[in-house]
Amino acid sequence: MEASWVKQGSLTVTKEDSVMTDPTNHTFDDDEYPVSSRDGRNDQPSASVSAARVTGTTEFMPGGVQNTGEHRGPDQRAVDERKRSRRSRRAFGTVERLPSGRFRARVIGPGGRYVSAPATFSNRTDAARWVDVQHADLVRGTWQAPVKPSASPSVAVYVARWIDEHPTARDSTKELYRGLLRTCVSPTLGRAAVASLSPAAVRRWHHQLGERLASDAERRRVDLLARGRQGSAASVRDGGVRQAQAYRLLRSAMTTAVGEGLLRANPCTIRGGAIPRRAVGRSRPINERLLSPSQVAAAAAAMPARYRALVVMAAWSGLRQGELLALTRADLDLDAIPARVAVRKAVRRTDTGQVRVDVPKTGSSVRVVTMPDPLTVVMREHLEQFVADQPEASVFATGTGSVPARSNLGATWRRACAKAGVPQVRLHDLRHVAQVNAAEAGATLPELMVRLGHATPAAAMVYLHARIDRDARLTTALGEAMRRAGSSALRTNI
């Protein structure tokens, strides 16, 4: 095609180069402000400008260049349309259609260099919206360079590092986190890049994890029943607690990732995902697992003599099992009025089976609990018979002086319940019994929180329940109140 040369002032313009654009328009032609080569390898703005900017458009006529406003030749309009469909430029970024049909968005960062979006877009609108959001962050001064998925650490690597660098978690808590990462997060989300994690992916993972944990729990329960064994506490669960724990771990780690600029928003957006669901139809209601004082006494009498005081102490003091096993003679002050026990530490068993004496569960767990007189008598007899005179001697220990294994202690307790003819409950359920006993004695919610070592009212309410026989007594009292009101007061005019 033969080029037509036209002289306009001091500027020489060819027909192919004469592409004029309204300077007030935010969309410019590539030849006016070229951004990169077609394959995208040139990342910086080009300094070459090959067309003159004037208002209106230019049409070539015999005898010179005529400014005809909106009229262009058919060939030139076709070229413009192809260029405009390939790339559009804003004052602060570009949107380019790639040969694959997807769209690449880029913005000019604070250093004057183009920064691409971490991924391409399926349509131009989404790409332009991303550019607008980046520009808004630049104006506010909150902009952070996006991280491409290829440069982002994997979920497994990032969460593992997050656990190791956690500033406040105890070693036992970190061990729990590592177990959740190994069994619940890594098998499905472990290889995914943090920057590519989406709410849809997290929701799909959360659902599949719940299904898998529930299936595993059901399989264990059926296997126990087939072997003629009574199900333990673990066998009546459906994995809801562990599912919620894994979700909380992932959500906390991704919150840190947002703060570090790896994510723009936390993808963990499942409503109620951090709350364990109940195993419907798999376990008895808690009020059916609350032993009465006489039932506690019968079960304690059926225990080996060395552990009878532990059962009574658990049901009337509310100490956690790990706190009971960590008690030493120096922690008991039986001469005080009333006698008291100082809770300063707790026994924990690691995944490797090692027994570790650690600080209690929370800061509120460090407390002093007073004991009723009958419990003081039981503890005096226990100290005289089973505990050495040294202040550091363990209050509840095996015959060899070691810390009882929780599995063995739980099995011993279940045999005692069967022997005494009381409902099969967990040894930990005695903590619920202690809370109810204190509440029925008139303790307020703040007093219950202090006694059981809870940091929040919500945690204390978990252990606050009503006995079945208590409901019957309330119903009887309501009937007496109705009779005292008289039959005439109960009738209504129809």
Image (tube, rainbow, N blue to C red):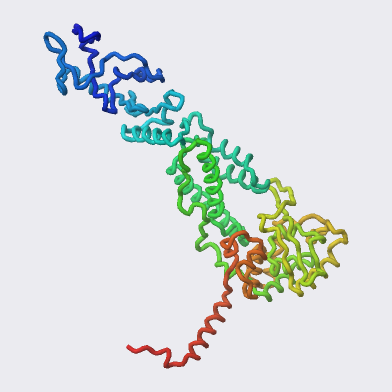
Residue 295: quarter of image:
bottom right
Q: Which residue is drawn at 52% across and 60% down?
A: 279
Q: In which quarter of the image is residue 367?
A: bottom right
As drawn, which residue projects farthest toward the left? 62
Of residues 287 and 160, the one drawn nearer to the viewer in this rendering: 160
Q: Position of residue 392 (x, y in %)?
A: 83, 56
| Outermost residue, front side | 9
User: Which residue is painted at 59% across and 57% down in the image?
Assistant: 235
Splitting the image into 4 quarters, where does residue 303 fall? Answer: bottom right
Residue 1 in view: no
- From what the image shows, is residue 272 above or below residue 431? above
Query: Relative to 76, does residue 290 appear above or below in the rendering?
Result: below
Where residue 41 appears, as percent x and y from the top left, is 40, 18
- Which corner quadrant holds the N terminus? top left
Which of the two residues, 167 or 46, is positioned nearer the viewer here? 46
Where does residue 382 sit, x and y in percent of width and height?
81, 67
- The percent coordinates of residue 280 (x first, y second) are 50, 62
Report the label total. 0
Question: In terms of depth relative to the viewer, which is nearer, 147 or 236?
Answer: 147
Residue 456 in sight: yes
Q: Is residue 491 left or right of residue 83?
A: right
- Quadrant that contains the C terminus: bottom left
Q: In this view, does 128 lie to the left or right of 215?
A: left
Q: In this view, does 387 lie to the left or right of 46?
A: right
Q: Which residue is drawn at 47% across and 31% down?
A: 145
